Image (cartoon, rainbow, N blue to C red):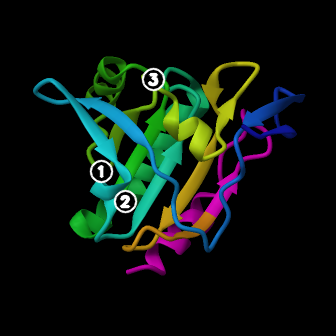
Amino acid sequence: MMSRSGAITFKGNPMTLAGEAVVVGQAAPEFKLHYFQDGMQQLTLADLKGKPSILSVVPSLDTGVCAMQTKKFNEALGKLGDSVNALTVSLDLPFAMNRFCGAEEITNLQSASDYQDRSFGNNWGTLIEELKILTRAIFVLDAGGKVTYVEYVPEVTSEPDYDAAMAALNAQL
């Protein structure tokens, strides 16, 4: 599998991302994520079809910037209700994701983990090879699963462009 050396930095240090970059206009790559709700459940690309979707990818909800990103998107998504799919993706365990989302009252984003086979990280070009965590990225999909917006945040410790991502999502409504 291909990788992209120096694609992003983590605290100023160049890092390698596994896989190929996702680009606007392509069909969204497949993935198999997991979440815990009355037992372990699976979430795939097919589950997102039919509504525009935003995927907020974070290294770990246990860090300040990831927590802030999740809270800001949760707030921004509040007025859209059930008209969109909104997902936070990380390698955190589903149980830890549930604890965070419960404690922080995250109700407008579903959390899903790539911990089992890293299919999201590899297929979406977000797995940092050196650190074995996901890089910070935002993807917006149309209702048919085509990619309409991509941001791989150049420095992992920086926040994404919330306004641009929400504008891209709102353009699909």
Stretch in magenta: 150-173
The residue to which callout 1 is attached is 108
Q: Is residue 8 above or below residue 86?
A: above
The residue to which callout 3 is attached is 115
Is residue 147 or residue 29 the one in the foreground?
29
Q: Is residue 38 magenta?
A: no
Q: Position of residue 124 (x, y in %)?
A: 60, 47
Q: Amino acid at mark 1?
A: Asn
Q: Residue at x 31, y 40 (%)?
A: 106
Q: Label 3 neighbourhood size at 10 Å, few (<14), some (14-19), many (20+)?
A: some
- Viewed as shown, does residue 89 lie left or right of 36? right
Is residue 116 or residue 126 the one in the foreground?
116
Q: Earlier in the sequence, mark 3 or mark 2?
A: 2
Which label belongs to residue 77? 2
Q: Position of residue 1 (x, y in %)?
A: 72, 37
- Viewed as shown, does residue 49 lie left or right of 130? left
Q: Amino acid at mark 3?
A: Tyr
Dot 2 and dot 1 residues touching (CB under 8 Å): yes
Q: Position of residue 33 (x, y in %)?
A: 38, 36
Kindly indicate the quadrant of the structure image that contains residue 5. Answer: top right
Q: Amino acid at mark 2?
A: Leu
Kindly indicate the quadrant of the structure image that contains residue 18. Answer: top right
Give the secondary structure at mark 2.
Answer: helix
Q: Is residue 172 magenta?
A: yes
Q: Residue at x 58, y 58 (%)?
A: 162
Calculate the distance from the C-alpha at mark 3 to the C-alpha at mark 2: 25 Å
Q: Position of residue 51 (x, y in %)?
A: 31, 70
Calculate the distance from the C-alpha at mark 1 to the C-alpha at mark 3: 22 Å
Q: Is residue 13 above or below residue 73?
A: above
- Viewed as shown, does residue 169 lie left or right of 155? left
